[in-house]
Image: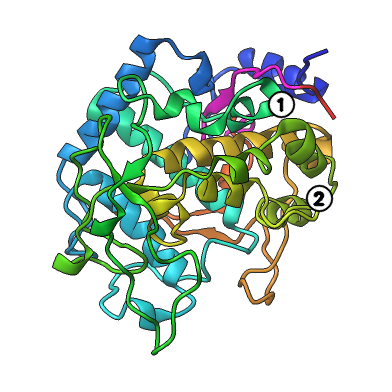
């Protein structure tokens, strides 16, 4: 039987009856009309077209963060610079021209899930407020693109050339490379391996940020690169074999880390599986955000976290894990989520824990449509 956790259904029903209240301290009122995020598989073609139009619009708008990152050329780049910068933060020598935010990084630490949740929310908000988007941020339910559902990853509707994000790359001879760090190669995720995407709405898009931690310059200009790895993705992104063992964990940090280091013992968790499955730019730990599929993938990662949050009452506000990827510090609800002035205000983690903002103390207002997955 396909059901959502009971707590989720109860919370949704309660939120529908909530009046708008003043959250105080500069926060918005409680969430009365949440955005409802749907799986890309469940969108109509007109809905898909509308989302793609809005994303293309962001690429056409001027960057707002050039005072911090002069190489940013468009509004989408504002989000890319933020991700590259904060991924590089533990080693400032990787981006010596950085004049933006500094922090402990956004991967393999306690802020990983809250940071990406807030980033996707702000991207969604930019689509709506700056490009007139009429929907909510879709999520890519890649579990539907596995043999578990009689499907293949490379045949996912997200790769459709007309009603999707374009397909695989070809002509790998035009690939740029990433310079070494302090004379040694960066981690294996850095080089772009694959070819230029030649169909779909982003086939003609030039990216000036990345690959890797580069913040612009002629050497960084490149196409959208993909190198789809279906077998890898299909072995990592199944609901029954990969997601359910993750959401059965009871501690926040185990769930967060399990997104990247699979609790099943597989080489990759669902976070890395999605990135490595698309490969190319998406495989790059710094500049993966260049590919618009980044936001689709991370909306799904957020969906899984949201799903886990509503499996038990104590999960909704559960947080933990190290502040720094080296294991030091303790992440708390008061730890900051850095988003820099040109994307959104910085907020404490507590402000992005409840996506329905039921007590009026947060900054979010959305939920997810039931995807019909079996409960644990």
Q: In the figure, 220 relative to 10: above or below?
A: below
Camera sees residue 252: yes
What residue lies at 32% left-to-right and 25% top-to-bottom?
161
Specify the segment rendered in magenta. 357-373
What residue lies at 81% left-to-right and 32% top-to-bottom?
311
Q: Which mark is residue 148?
A: 1
Is 76 covered by the magenta stretch?
no
Please name whichever residue, 204 or 125, is drawn nearer the observer in this view of the structure: 204
Image coordinates for residue 345, horizontal then vertical, percent: 39, 51
Please name whichever residue, 297 or 328, is drawn nearer the observer in this view of the structure: 297
Q: In the figure, 245 relative to 337: above or below?
A: above
Q: Residues within 10 Å of mark 1 (few under 14, many from 20)?
A: some
Q: Secondary structure at mark 1?
A: helix
Q: Are marks 1 and 2 in contact (CB under 8 Å)?
A: no
Q: Secondary structure at mark 2?
A: loop
The quarter of the displayed image where residue 145 is located: top right
The scheme the figure's colours follow is rainbow
Image coordinates for residue 227, horizontal then vertical, percent: 42, 47
Q: In the figure, 59 relative to 269: above or below?
A: above
- Mark 2, residue position: 264
Q: Quadrant of the C terminus?
A: top right
Image coordinates for residue 263, horizontal then vertical, percent: 79, 52
| In the displayed structure image, the side of residue 91 where residue 203 appears, left or right | left
């Amino acid at each position: 039987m396909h059901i959502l956790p009971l707590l989720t259904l109860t919370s949704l029903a309660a939120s529908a009856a909530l009046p708008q209240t003043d959250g105080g301290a500069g926060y918005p009122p409680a969430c009365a009309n949440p955005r409802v995020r749907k799986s890309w598989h469940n969108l109509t073609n007109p809905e898909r077209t509308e989302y793609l139009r809005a994303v293309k619009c962001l690429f056409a708008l001027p960057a707002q963060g050039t005072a911090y990152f002069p190489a940013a050329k468009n509004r989408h780049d504002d989000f890319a610079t933020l991700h590259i910068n904060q991924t590089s933060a533990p080693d400032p020598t990787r981006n010596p021209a950085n004049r933006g935010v500094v922090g402990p990084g956004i991967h393999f630490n306690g802020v990983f899930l809250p940071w990406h949740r807030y980033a996707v929310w702000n991207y969604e908000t930019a689509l709506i407020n700056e490009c007139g988007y009429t929907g909510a941020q879709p999520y890519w339910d890649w579990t539907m693109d596995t043999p578990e559902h009689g499907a293949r990853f490379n045949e996912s509707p997200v790769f459709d050339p007309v009603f999707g994000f374009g397909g695989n790359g070809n002509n790998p001879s035009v690939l740029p490379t990433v310079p070494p760090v302090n004379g040694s190669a960066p981690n294996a995720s850095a080089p772009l391996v694959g070819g230029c995407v030649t169909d779909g709405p982003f086939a003609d898009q030039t990216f000036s940020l990345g690959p890797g931690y580069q913040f612009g310059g002629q050497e960084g200009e490149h196409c959208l690169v993909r190198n789809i790895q279906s077998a890898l993705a299909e072995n990592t992104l199944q609901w029954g074999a990969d997601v359910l063992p993750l959401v059965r964990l009871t501690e926040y940090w185990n769930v967060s880390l399990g997104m990247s280091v699979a609790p099943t013992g597989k080489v990759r968790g669902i976070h890395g599986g999605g990135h490595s499955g698309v490969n190319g730019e998406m495989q790059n730990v710094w500049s993966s955000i260049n590919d618009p599929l980044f936001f689709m993938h991370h909306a799904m990662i957020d969906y899984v976290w949201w799903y886990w949050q509503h499996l038990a009452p104590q999960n909704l506000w559960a947080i933990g894990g190290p502040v720094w990827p080296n294991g030091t510090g303790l992440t708390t609800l008061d730890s900051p989520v850095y988003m820099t002035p040109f994307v959104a205000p910085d907020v404490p983690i507590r402000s992005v824990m409840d996506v329905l903002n039921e007590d009026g103390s947060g900054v979010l207002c959305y939920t997810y449509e039931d995807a019909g997955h079996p409960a644990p």
